[in-house]
Image (tube, rainbow, N blue to C red):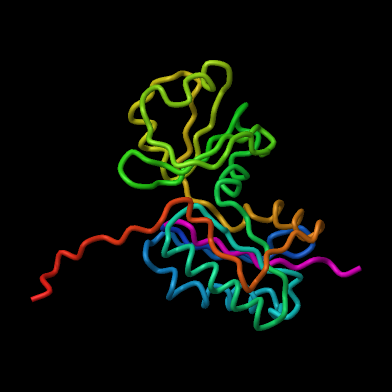
């Protein structure tokens, strides 16, 4: 039996990363945390990891992409690219919740893991996971307050992980709170993507859309229209 090959794409925040896995191991990876580069750098990153590994896109078993929540623009770029590749080479599409990706990056570090993706003002996209990365609450948009997660913190050590944790770190002093300010990484998609491949849990390439959680709101241009 051939070893499964997975192309992993993560673009849900300012960061953009791509990883290629074969036989359950990451064999090539690219990542940048420079914002607003997704559209220009994603395709070159994909080409680079394939060339570096000597693997053709047609040899991939499936293509996995972070499905959200997260940045509207980033998610559109990642999902559109993944769908285009799947259409072009006839490969199945796997979608991974972005909060699960972050939880995988903190697995085993505390009794509970609470990923936080930065949203507007004091808001974050979040959910609660156990130490083995099983989701225990719904994915929600939460407005942070000093009392947020108090009951959880009173009974558990809790790792808050993601690019939204600085907001909560600034307003809580609970001794059970741990923090890891980081971005979701495509390499952390490997385990859930492999599980989806084994179970044949694939997305409908024609109709799959990112999980935005909230509707996109366009900003008002500061430039005069006159």
Where residue 133 sits in the image (x, y, percent)?
66, 39
Tell whether position 6 is magenta: yes
Quarter of the figure that contains the N terminus: bottom right
Q: Residue furthest top?
A: 154
Report which quarter residue 5 is drawn in: bottom right
Residue at the spot 30% in from the left edge and 43% down from the top edge: 121
Where residue 30 sits in the image (x, y, percent)?
54, 65
Judged left or right of residue 33, residue 92 is right
Tally the numbered discs.
0
Q: Which residues are magenta?
A: 1-13
Report which quarter residue 165 is drawn in: top left
Where residue 120 sits in the image (x, y, percent)?
33, 46
Report which quarter residue 194 is drawn in: bottom right
Residue at the spot 41% in from the left edge and 65% down from the top edge: 73
Quarter of the figure that contains the C terminus: bottom left
Where residue 44 sits in the image (x, y, percent)?
52, 77
- Looking at the picture, tell me which residue is in the foreground, 167 or 26: 167
Residue at the spot 75% in from the left edge and 65% down from the top edge: 22
- Looking at the picture, tell me which residue is in the foreground, 156 or 90: 90
Q: Residue furthest bottom?
A: 88
Q: Residue furthest right?
A: 1
Tell whether position 125 is magenta: no
């Amino acid at each position: 039996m051939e070893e499964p090959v997975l192309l992993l794409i993560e673009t849900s925040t300012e960061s953009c990363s791509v990883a290629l896995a074969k036989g359950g191991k990451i064999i090539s990876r690219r990542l940048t945390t420079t914002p607003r580069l997704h559209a220009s750098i994603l395709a070159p990153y994909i080409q680079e990891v394939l060339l570096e590994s000597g693997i053709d896109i047609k040899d991939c078993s499936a293509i996995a992409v972070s499905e959200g929540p997260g940045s509207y623009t980033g998610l559109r770029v990642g999902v559109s690219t993944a769908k285009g590749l799947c259409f072009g080479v006839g490969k199945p599409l796997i979608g991974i919740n972005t909060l699960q990706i972050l939880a995988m990056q903190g697995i085993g570090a505390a009794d509970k893991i609470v990923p936080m993706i930065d949203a507007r003002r004091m808001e974050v996209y979040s959910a609660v996971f156990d130490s083995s990365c099983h989701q225990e609450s719904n994915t929600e948009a939460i407005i942070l307050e000093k009392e947020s997660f108090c009951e959880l913190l009173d009974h558990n050590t809790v790792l808050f992980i993601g690019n939204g944790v600085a907001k909560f770190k600034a307003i809580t002093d609970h001794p059970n709170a741990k923090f890891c300010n980081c971005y979701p990484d495509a390499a952390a998609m490997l385990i859930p993507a492999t599980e989806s491949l084994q179970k044949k849990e694939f997305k409908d390439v024609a109709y799959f859309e990112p999980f935005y959680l909230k509707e996109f709101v366009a900003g008002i241009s500061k430039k005069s229209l006159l």
